[in-house]
Image (cartoon, grey):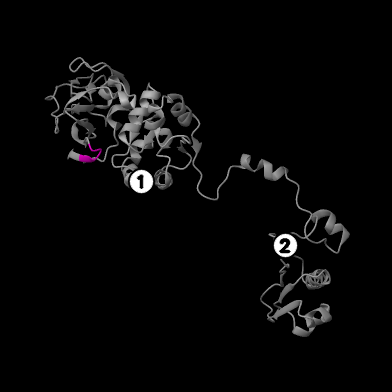
């Protein structure tokens, strides 16, 4: 006998109205024909369901009734969908388990503090029960109100969910739902526009599948709720639509290097003492490392000594490390008068196991 909400052997197809609670889209229909309402627990048998089990029991009763949040710009319809209810002067953000049962609620009090009633044993994201486990895009916000604001601004089938306990635990919350998130082609992190939000987005992005993560930005507002209250629903849409691909620090896209590629190279502080080499390399510049390679006996050491002498003659201070020749040979190869004047410092370590190393320290 299958359970009342058997998603292990069936796949989500679409949302439908629930005949029991009257919700317009809380009943999920699966490809084996069975249906389950995430709002009231109503169950309908499918093609392979032989015996209908007892109606699923709520482990935490839904409290209050859905009402619009006019100051936030959120409609009653959106509150009903997400099971955000008002009871007296308190708001209840209901959370659901993997099996669709309500397990608890996060309660917002009049003094804007939060407390939990019941629990969230499966670590579900707020609103996660409303959406399938695969799709084009899912948006994750830092708070429940922001998820409602995103859905209000961008209604339809795009999943808008929230981490349950804010920025400080966003990474841990997302780790718990990696299996569910893996089914989406794009995962958009829409956290607050402050230091805590940016740090949380960076931490969360690090545990998500590479190449799927994008980060939404609202430069003129703290979060999606602020934008919606200001009547800027379009700004929320654009932030989601134009979310930028997450790149770890130090990694850039090639297209962002176009300006640097087209910029001509500096001519350098000094010319090379060889016309052909100067035409190809366009001078000696700071911030560059030049490696000289050639077969044994070709003249690598001679080339480096001539280059060092050239720079000394142009007034530069040179540090010269020769690791496989004698002090006398190096001194004879350089302009000895300049060495005696203190413009060139020698560090000579004879060894047959190391290639020649020339360190040029240009004056500042």
Callouts 1 and 2 close, C-beta under 8 Å: no
User: Is disc 2 placed on a helix, strand or loop?
Assistant: loop
Classify residue 71 as left or right of residue 20.
Answer: right
**Most extreme residue toward the front, as rendered?**
111
Classify residue 71 as left or right of residue 334.
Answer: left
Q: Which residue is more in the foreground, 220 or 201?
A: 220
- From the top left corner, tell me how far across and down residue 112 is, in percent: 25, 38
Residue at 43% across, 40% down? 193
Q: Which residue is more in the foreground, 11 or 363?
A: 363
Residue at 23% across, 28% down? 6
Residue 274 can be seen in this image: yes
Q: Mark 2 = which residue?
A: 290
Does the magenta-highlighted stretch encompass residue 362?
no
Q: Mark 1 = which residue?
A: 171
User: Is disc 1 placed on a helix, strand or loop?
Assistant: helix
- From the top left corner, tell me how far across and down residue 139 is, in percent: 39, 33
- From the top left corner, tell me how far across and down residue 258 is, in percent: 67, 41
**Most extreme residue toward the right, as rendered?**
275
Displayed quadrant of residue 56: top left
Determine whether 16 is above or below 321 in the image: above
Judge depth for marks 1 and 2 and give the one in front: 1
Q: Which residue is more in the foreground, 295 or 20?
A: 20
Magenta-drawn segment: 111-115
Local crowd size for mark 1, using a 10 Å CA cut-off: few (<14), some (14–19), many (≥20): many
Displayed quadrant of residue 69: top left
């Amino acid at each position: 006998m299958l359970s009342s909400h058997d998603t292990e052997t069936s796949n989500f197809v679409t949302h439908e109205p629930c005949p029991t609670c009257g919700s317009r889209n809380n009943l999920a229909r699966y490809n084996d024909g069975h249906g389950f309402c995430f709002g009231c627990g109503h169950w309908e048998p499918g093609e392979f369901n032989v015996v209908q089990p007892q109606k699923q029991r709520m482990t935490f009763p839904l409290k209050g009734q859905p009402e619009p949040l006019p100051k936030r710009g959120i409609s009653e319809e959106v509150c009903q969908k997400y099971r955000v209810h008002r009871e007296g002067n308190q708001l209840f953000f209901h959370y659901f388990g993997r099996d669709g049962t309500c397990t608890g609620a996060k309660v917002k009090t009049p003094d804007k503090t939060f407390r939990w009633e019941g629990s969230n044993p499966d670590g579900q994201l707020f609103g996660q029960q409303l959406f399938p486990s695969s799709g084009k895009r899912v948006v994750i916000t830092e708070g429940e109100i922001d998820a409602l604001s995103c859905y209000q601004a961008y209604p339809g089938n795009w999943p808008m969910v929230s981490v349950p306990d804010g920025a400080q635990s966003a990474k841990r919350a997302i780790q718990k739902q990696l299996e569910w998130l893996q089914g989406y082609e794009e995962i958009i992190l829409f956290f607050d526009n402050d230091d805590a939000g940016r740090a949380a987005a960076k931490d969360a992005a690090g545990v998500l599948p590479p190449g799927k993560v994008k980060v939404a930005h609202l430069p003129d507002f703290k979060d999606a709720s602020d934008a919606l209250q200001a009547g800027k629903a379009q700004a929320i849409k654009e932030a989601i639509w134009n979310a930028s691909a997450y790149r770890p620090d130090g990694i850039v896209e090639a297209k962002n290097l176009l300006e640097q590629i087209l910029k001509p190279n500096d001519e350098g502080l000094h010319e090379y003492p060889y016309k052909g080499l100067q035409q190809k390399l366009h001078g000696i510049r700071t911030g560059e490392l030049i490696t000289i390679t050639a077969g044994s006996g070709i003249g690598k050491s001679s080339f480096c000594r001539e280059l060092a002498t050239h720079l000394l003659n142009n007034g530069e201070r040179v540090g010269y490390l020769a690791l496989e020749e004698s002090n006398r040979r190096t001194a004879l190869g350089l302009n000895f008068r300049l060495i005696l004047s203190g413009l060139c410092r020698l560090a000579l370590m004879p060894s047959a196991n190391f290639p020649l190393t020339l360190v040029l320290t240009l004056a500042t």
